[in-house]
Amino acid sequence: MMTLARFEALCDAHGGQIACWPEAERAEAIAFLQAHAEAAQPRLDAARALEDLLSQASIEAPSKALYQRVVAGGIAARQSRQPVWASVAAALMLTVGLGAGWLAGPDGTSYTDEVFASAFGAFETVDSLSLEEGA
Amino acid sequence: MRPKLRVIPGPPSDARQRDAQGDDRALAKAVARGERAAIAELTRRCLPVVYSIARRLINEGAEAEDLAQETFVKVWRAIDRYDAERARLETWVARIATNVCLDRLRKRREATLGEDVPEPPDPAARADALLEAGGSADRVRQAVGRLPERQRLALELCSFQDHTNIEVANILGVSVEAVESLLARARRTLKQELLDESRDLIDGLAGAHGGES
């Protein structure tokens, strides 16, 4: 049940806007205010007046320079903390790329092609020799 | 200017809550991957509340900036461990900021232990200082600055930032009832101080609201 003490406690805890008070107590508070306006209204008015005063004491917004320093710090901190596997993967890709580049010949023919050609060429030579010997 | 009206909503719908959790989780993961846009977005969302907490508790601009940066160093380190199901991203970051600032204040107190303890201020001298401060904004700031740390924090988060009592309870690591008690004590103290010192001003402002409900 709403009492003057509870009404005053709600003014102190939640300020002078009944709409901002806990939902469960709003209807009772409004009814109490209507029934006991002489005692309740000054308390509500004082709470509102205090809110008006408090609104003059708000903190200024943080500076743009601070914002930029914080963002720069965040980028540096997080990018230096990327997982080890990411650097390993990057190193591996670099190695593969360099290897492929080294294997490729200047005319676009890869050394691998030359190796295969010489290997099959050797088999062909062996085969032709065997045929000649058999003949 | 009246503070932004903060209607206490009912519990958020499950779908809305899931969406918010999903957004926070995705942003945290992108930050963890070092994505610049995500780091900028998290900073844009959270720096104002971090700076306000630091400024309200420390009351010195350069040191507040230093504490804001220290808070974000911890955020960047711990972002892999952020759990979207436990708290919104802003709440999680605000809690880190609160711990960083309270830690700094504790160290400061420990450093002054053994030094000459200053005498409590003379109330008459304080009234003179308030008069000299001139503008009511300075008077209010000074009165808020004299509140105990946790009352100041609860007031900053509830009255100046757009946090609900439940979120503030999460940030301060206390129950919702404890937050209400902190707020009630803070407002009672301020009312007593500011109403006594600014009766004319308050009467004028209250008159403007008279009869509203």
Image (spheres, grey):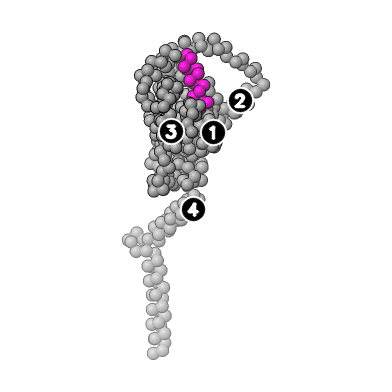
Q: Chain of mark 1?
A: B
Question: Marks 3 and 2: CB-CB under 8 Å?
Answer: no
Q: Which residue is mark 3?
A: A28
Magenta segment: B184-197
Residue that carries the numbered disc 2 in the rendered image: B109
Badge 4 crowding class, 10 Å Cα cut-off, few under 14, some 14 to 19, many 20 or more, is few
Asked if the residues shown at circle 4 and circle 2 are in contact, with their CB atoms under 8 angstroms apart, the answer is no
* Residue identified by numbered label 1: B178
Please tell me which of labels 3 and 4 falls first in the chain: 3
Camera-nearest label, 1 or 3: 3
Badge 1 marks a residue whose secondary structure is helix
Q: Chain of mark 2?
A: B
Q: Are marks 3 and 2 on the same chain?
A: no
Do residues under tags 1 and 2 come within 8 Å of each other at their CB atoms? Answer: no
Which amino acid type corresponds to the residue marked 4 in the rendered image?
Trp
Mark pair 1, 4: CA separation: 47 Å
Residue at the location (62% across, 22% down)? Answer: B112
Position of A107 compared to B79: left or right? Answer: left
* Residue visible at 65% across and 19% down in the picture: B115
Work out which residue is located at the far left of the displayed protein and give it.
A107
Q: Is residue A127 magenta?
A: no
Q: Residue B169: image x %, image y %?
A: 51, 36
Residue A68 appears anywhere in the view = no
Identify the subunit bearing mark 3: A
Confirm or deny contact between disc 1 and disc 4 (CB under 8 A): no
